[in-house]
Image (tube, rainbow, N blue to C red):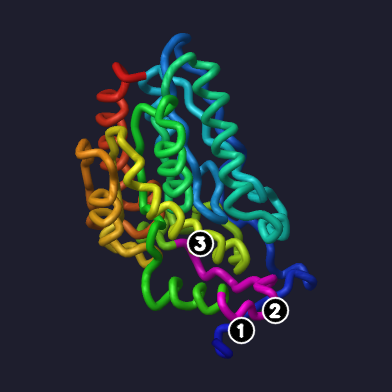
Amino acid sequence: MAAFEKRFVTLEDGRYGRLVGAGDPSAIRIEGAAGHGGLLALHGFAGTPNEVRILTDVAARLGLSARAPRLAGHDSDVRHLMKVGWDDWLSSATSALFELSDTTAGRVVVAGLSMGALLAAHLAARHAERVAGLIALANATWLRLPSPALVLHLCEVLRPFGNHFYVPKASADIRDAEARRRHLTYDVTPIHGAVEVLRAGRQVRAELSGVTCPTLVIHGALDKVCPPSNATRFANALGTKDVEVAIMQHSGHIVSADSDRAQVARLTQGFVQRMIPRM
């Protein structure tokens, strides 16, 4: 733990605390045909809506409305991310679900990456009347041992510096070199928020039996953050038997942007097309 604490950085000298990568970090809003349902895509912790754009692009091709909100605290200043947690992110996701389902007068496919998959699963369990289907990419219900799970557990218990510190982020867990270079994320990880993700995983594990809608689970075989075994553990814990599990053999954690992203898009499109009669 002492060695880990020595890695912390402050943001006072201006060297850290920026979004790095390429692309537009703004929320995504697509208006489809009136009277249809839609797709809600939720990005991961310390990410941006850009990392789930592949999902909203599928909705656009199918003529559906789509939303990918920028979750609470995920703006240009990483210090704001230190001040929020699960309840704030859930508020962002719930508001987006209600707005989309009310606007389209239909049900919604909810999808998410990593922490976004936790939010999507929670929405599917708690708001089944608004949710037609669930897509969980790189779900963060369990984190990889020993790191980051054990490190974050120690931070949760010992609370070094009150967990109000940051550690530098080397790069995103993406095997495609060009996609990794372009991926939009912060150059540091706020430990307070990362601990919130750890806690959220425990909460959502207890809620999975309440998910009764059809579900697509996608995970990268090379994921260094959330073990590939999450895919089957997540699927087996669901309250629905209508579940498909797909392992992307050449992808890491950000499976929506990695080497198998074209296959992710095809699987997503097939699943959403199947859900359209339910919307």
Write down the residue under mark 1.
5
Q: Measure the C-alpha gap from mark 2 to mark 3.
A: 19 Å
| Of the image marks 2 and 3, the number of the one nearer the N terminus | 2
| Of the image marks 3 and 1, the number of the one nearer the N terminus | 1
Write down the residue under mark 3.
199
Side of 250 where 67 appears, left or right: right
Q: Quadrant of the C terminus?
A: top left
Which of the two discs, 1 and 2, sits closer to the camera?
Answer: 2
Please state which amino acid type lies under the numbered disc 1.
Glu
Please state which amino acid type lies under the numbered disc 3.
Arg
Please state which amino acid type lies under the numbered disc 2.
Phe
Which of the two discs, 2 and 3, sits closer to the camera?
Answer: 3
Q: Dot 2, crowdedness within 10 Å: few (<14), some or many (≥20)?
A: few
- Horizontal and vertical percent position of residue 201: 44, 58
Q: Measure the C-alpha gap from mark 3 to mark 1.
A: 21 Å
- Horizontal and vertical percent position of residue 151: 49, 77
Q: Judge whether 241 appears above or below 168 on screen.
A: above
Q: Magenta stretch containing residue 230, yes or no?
A: no
Q: Judge whether 126 appears above or below 35 on screen.
A: below
Q: Residue at x 41, y 37 (%)?
A: 124
Q: Name the secondary structure under disc 3.
A: helix
Write down the residue under mark 2.
161
Q: Judge whether 53 appears above or below 196 on screen.
A: above
Task: Name the one closer to the observer, 201 or 265.
Answer: 201
Q: Name the secondary structure under disc 1.
A: helix
